[in-house]
Image (cartoon, coloured by chain):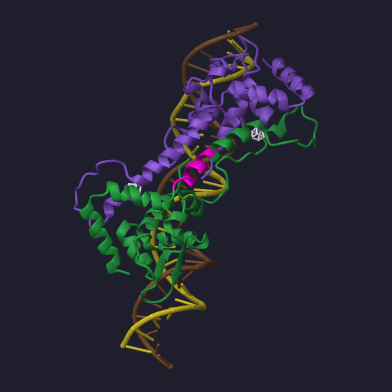
Chain colours: A purple, B green, C brown, D yellow
Amino acid sequence: MQLRNHVEWAIHCCAILAGVPEEHYLATRDLAEFHGVPKEYLSKALQALSTAGLIESTLGPGGGYRLSKPAKEITFLDIVEAVEGKASTFVCTEIRRNNPCRPKGARESKACAVARVMWEADDAWRAKLRSVRLSDLIKTLQQDVPADLLEKTGKWVTLRT
Amino acid sequence: MQLRNHVEWAIHCCAILAGVPEEHYLATRDLAEFHGVPKEYLSKALQALSTAGLIESTLGPGGGYRLSKPAKEITFLDIVEAVEGKASTFVCTEIRRNNPCRPKGARESKACAVARVMWEADDAWRAKLRSVRLSDLIKTLQQDVPADLLEKTGKWVTLRT
DNA sequence: TCAATTAAGGATATACAATATCCTTAATTG
DNA sequence: CAATTAAGGATATTGTATATCCTTAATTGA
Ligand code: SF4
Ligand code: SF4
């Protein structure tokens, strides 16, 4: 079980978009070039973020994307669920219903014990993702990434907005 | 992103095997019939559990599988990792290396901030799975499942060991 | 010893999802 | 009006999950 690489792309794109000046936009072309990924395919991930209301777009020259709310109000979970969906990683196919000893047509009183545990684990994963905000990532990057690279990157982005 | 159904099958099979009398075995055929899943395919999941050392097998008539240690010493994580592998759900493809502002060939001092967050979430998921033992599941089932069905099922299993 | 049984595991087929590209449409800009 | 851009439909390609089949070797009981 592996997350799609859209997740990595989407998080990076949000991090870059967080550095776009107010009232400006950054185009898919530039995000794709920056990350070295295919523009048309990255576009699908950006559309998902847009549909989820995390980023917003405008058309025409100078158009592109920007965050639609402050980085503090966007969590990792928002981004992950935008591109991976909200469905649980564990899907119960109710194989317990096949138990040959069970009277046919019997209703289950509640979700199976197995599924409950798996769903709790899924919740723990989401809770962790929900606890980290895009603004936290930006802070970490400002500590981790060398100052000169950070500055150059900022300029690269500004040049294209 | 979805877990394979081998996970559900494997957990159920372990739960059934926990009810197999000492020194007895239950064959793949019976486990497949009980759960209503294809025998040959279920066999792959059981082989994974066997390779992981959670269950053990013997050949010949009366052969099959049994737990290779007490249910108290088997966690959900053991089972999930046996069939899904231990690799993280998030794979970092290091797209940060493509940053056009970055000097080529530069070494990264540490794992990217994005990957660290995603890995922590993955760890939270695994920690939850590690905290639940097969013996806990058995206890829950004994409360959830009606007594008569539990008894019938126990007999069904015993008959075939 | 022999025939039946069983797990292990290789080979292969099928179905579906992830990845990737292409193209059309409509909105926006200058 | 011409250029630019996101949205999104259509489709191709690749890879993984699902599923089946078959061979081998170990074990059992007759
Ligand atoms: S145990 Fe839970 S998950 Fe597995 S089949 Fe029964 S109900 Fe579905
Ligand atoms: S952010 Fe982390 S995960 Fe994403 S590319 Fe950079 S290193 Fe890889």
Using residue A98 as the reference point, say whether residue D4 is left or right of it: right
Q: Is residue B67 above or below residue A43?
A: below
Instruction: Say which of B88 and C19 sits in front.
Output: B88
Q: Is residue B47 above or below residue A136?
A: below
**Which is nearer the eye, C26 or A148?**
A148
In this picture, which residue range is highlighted in magenta?
Answer: B124-132
Please, what is the dominant secondary structure of the magenta stretch? helix
Left-right relation of B33 to A8 = left
Q: Position of residue B150 (x, y in %)?
A: 25, 55
Kindly tell me whether residue A120 is visible in this rendering.
yes
Q: Position of residue A24 (x, y in %)?
A: 62, 12
Q: Is residue A80 visible?
A: no
Residue drawn at x 27%, y 61% is: B154
State which quadrant residue D21 falls in: bottom left
Percent position (x, y) of residue B137? 37, 49
> Is C27 drawn above or below residue B100 in the view shown?
above
Tell me the residue at 65%/39% (across/down): B93
Figure quarter occupied by ligand 2: top right
Task: Point out the image quarter for the C terminus of chain B.
Answer: bottom left
Query: Could you tell me how many numbered marks the image carries?
Result: 0
Quick check: is B125 in the magenta stretch? Answer: yes
Q: Is residue A132 magenta?
A: no
Write down the quadrant of residue B20 in the picture.
Answer: bottom left
Report whether B121 appears left or right of C14: right
Indicate the position of residue B80 as horizontal and vertical percent values.
Answer: 48, 50
- Looking at the image, which is closer to me, A115 or B39? A115
Residue name at image x 61 percent, y 9 percent? A23
Which residue is painted at 67% across and 30% down in the image?
A35
